[in-house]
Amino acid sequence: MLSGGGSKGAFEVGVLQRLMGDEQLDYDLLCGTSVGAINAAYLAQTPLGQPREAAMKLRALWDTVSTEKVHKRWFPFGNAQAFFKTSVYDSEPLHQWIRAGLDVAPCARPAAGFGSSRSRSAPGSPS
């Protein structure tokens, strides 16, 4: 289970690099939430039995991460415009970054061993 939480995703990559890259441990099932689901989906791109390659590809992906690829301020009114949006930042760059490198076909294979979850709280409700 790969957890969510932004920067935890980068930490997970380091752990996975050690386990899958150095120790050559493979997975039976990948499951993640939020950034963990992104990591799991990218790991599922590489066929089972190739843990080192999967870890290397995931690390290469994270080596390209920058603030500009994750979010940007709303334009032209910045944070003031966020009052009329569902979040403080525009996450479209993140969506584009994910779509650019993610092939969903390997994730849809029954043998991929991939699962993800997502949740959304109603505005004003406890998370």
Image (tube, grey):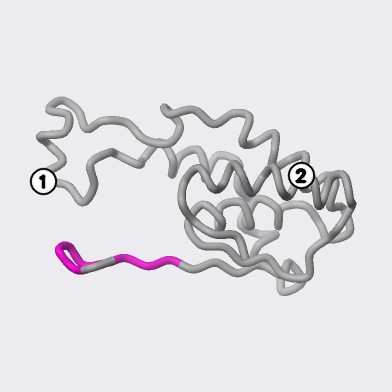
- Quadrant location of the C terminus? bottom left
Labels 1, 2: front one: 2
Q: Residue furthest bottom?
A: 110
Determine which quarter of the picture holds residue 70. top left
Q: Residue at x 44, y 40 (%)?
A: 94
Reading the chain from its start, which is encountered first: label 1 or label 2? 2
Main secondary structure along the magenta-highlighted residues: loop
Task: Tell me the residue at 55%/39% (across/down).
Answer: 100
- Please, is residue 5 above or below residue 66 in the view? below
Part of the protein shown in magenta: 118-125
Q: What residue does disc 2 label?
A: 17
- Residue 101 x, y percent position in the rendering: 60, 41
What is the number of the mark on residue 84?
1
The relative height of residue 90 versus residue 122 in the rendered view (above or below) is: above
Question: Considering depth in this image, is 94 or 88 the residue closer to the camera?
Answer: 88
What residue is rendered at 35% in x and 41% in y?
91
User: In the rendered view, does 1 fall on the left or right side of 73?
Assistant: right
- Where is residue 25 drawn, in percent x and y? 86, 58
Location of residue 92 in the rendering, given as x and y in whole percent from the top left corner: 36, 40
Three-letter code, disc 2: Gln
Q: Is residue 39 left or right of residue 83?
A: right
Q: Amino acid at mark 1?
A: Phe
